[in-house]
Amino acid sequence: MSEVADVLRRLAVVFTEFEARLEQTALIRKLTRGRFTLADYRAFLIGLRQQVKDGALWMSRAASNIDEQHLELRSKLMRHAVTEHRDFRLLDADYVATGGALADIEGAEKNLGSEALSAWMFHEASRPNPFGLLGAMWIIEGLGSIKAAEWGAMCRDRLALPDEAVRFLLYHGENDAEHIAEFETMLGLVLPDEAVAARIVRTAQVTARLYALQIEEICP
Amino acid sequence: MRLSRSECYCLAMAGLRSAYITGAGAFLPGEPVGVDRMEDHLGRIGGRDSLLGRRALRWNGVETRHYALGQDGLPVISNAGMTAEAVRAALDDAGLGRGDLQFLAAATTQGDYLVPGHAASVHGELGGGPLEIASFQSVCGSSLMAAKSAWLQVRAGEHDVAVACAGEFSSRWFRPSFYEGSALVDAKGRLRAEADYLRFTLSDGAGAIVIEPKPRPDRLSLKIEFIDLVSLAGSFDPCMWAGAAVEDRTDPLATWSHAGPAAAQAAGAVALLQDFDLLKRVIRAWVGAYLEKVDQGRIVPAEIDHLLCHYSARSLREEIVGLLEKTAGMIPEEKWFSNLATVGNIGSASIWVMLEAFLRTGRLQRGQKVLCVVPESGRAFVGFMLLEAV
């Protein structure tokens, strides 16, 4: 199970299980069942912000722990971190566009799930050659390319929000095909390798569970 | 689930038999109906052509279909009647008759009666002496629920001739009276998309297979390797349903029978409805369930010679096909057999109507493997059946 296609298949299964779990969380149930309120949307933005803000940071830390034999992967992670490290500002702007106060989203505490997720990511990123984090990226990028636009459209439609209050979610929905191709290339840089393959899948599973916990904790 | 050698030994000692599909039958009512004449049979809501119809047809790729409603909108045959015709055809194809039948498993989305089950109605139409029967009610996937029951009956040695059959009379649900005067039609007389889409997607017919403990000596039979049924209803809300209004569909206490039939009709809780947003997520869940089977080695894509999928490759979105290819899960499109475009989507009957048409093509060779995949959007269900030509 160490070839790229085998790992991608395992990851696809982990992602669909993750989606099924998200579907059952109280917050997403409110969204899909038409019970979602503006307060829920604001809480959602606050919840998302923690991981988005930390994302570029753990990615940078992971890059700094990648050895010279894997420079290409290191470059990719660094570029990725640069591209994304200001994205949380977009969440702030969306929050303000809904009529919320900037200080509220900036000063919000991480929920229990976000604490666990963040601790896990930085822990993994601190290990030498933390290739398992590709599994974490699969989950988090998958959320961006598959779930975000879907959620964004639902939030906008249910709450009759203007597009500029839902930019983060709507804007993340693009580049789906590119996302898989890019990810495949990254997997190719560390596979085939039985132990790395297993670690990538395991890291995806843990990240998915903790991410879902973060969503659960938005509406406990 | 893989069995250990000792578990296999135990099963062999328990006397489980192999079982084979030895005949298949189909019944399609009336002449094929083209796109331009669909609403002649179904009727027009408020007397006007549907606006959504063309779009639904582009998406589902169906060109002709059959209706058990004549051009005057009156029924020409019942659901049970169609199903019984398919059972007779399947028994005949197997070289058997009604007198040989011992077990009848019948599937449908909705029988002619609310109560009792479809199998009783089909037995009623077939006539003849006592039979063991079982009814399965869901949507497309009820076909394989019935097939699993029939297969296990034969495997366990309870019966030597079992039939799994399925019938649909969807078009009666699409008559204007199901919608007019309800909350599903707006002030301008337009039908909600959740309802209108299905009017252009589903049609009528029936299919059946015969299962026996021995293959035919004179021609190919299909050994049933496994039938795996996967429900993900624990995670997903109803996606295609009838019996609840769009807004109330997740609350079992808000379903039609609590309000009573007249109030339920007015609330738009009686028609067949589909949630499109959810459908996209359900499609990914189906793909996940399939890839899990591949991952477990239960399905080996390279070993599949023919794929009969109750869903067209065309309507799978590009990224799903892309994902299947990148994960070594794709079965090349030239191995897909489908008659969906000409016979329409017949819900639970589709897989048997497709199998019957496939067997008539003569493409099947001894030793080849046939994978049947039946996804059901009802509440996130997917079934897999692997067959080998012997």
Image (spheres, rainbow, N blue to C red):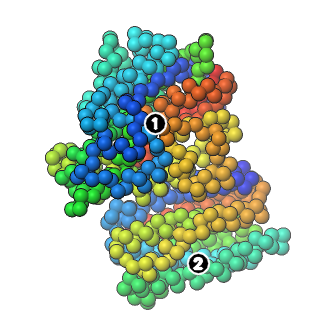
Looking at the picture, does residue A93 appear above or below residue B79?
below
Number of residues whose C-alpha sits closer than 10 Å to that of mark 2, classed few (under 14), some (14–19) or many (20 or more): some
Q: Amino acid at mark 1?
A: Val
Whether residue B367 sits left or right of residue B144 in the image: it is right
- Residue found at x 52% / y 58%: A18
Q: Quadrant of the N terminus of chain B?
A: top right
Residue that badge 2 annotates? A54
Q: Secondary structure at mark 2?
A: helix
Q: In the displayed image of the protein, which residue is found farthest to the right? A: A69
In front: B86, or A83?
B86
| Cα–Cα gap, marks 2 and 1 | 54 Å
Question: What is the quadrant of residue A31 in the picture?
Answer: bottom left
Question: What is the quadrant of residue B8 in the picture?
Answer: top right
Residue that badge 1 annotates? B343
Q: Amino acid at mark 2?
A: Asp
Residue A42 % position (x, y): 40, 78
- Residue found at x 43% / y 69%: A153
Whether residue B248 sits left or right of residue A58 in the image: it is left
Q: Are marks 2 and 1 on the same chain?
A: no
Residue A178 % position (x, y): 65, 66
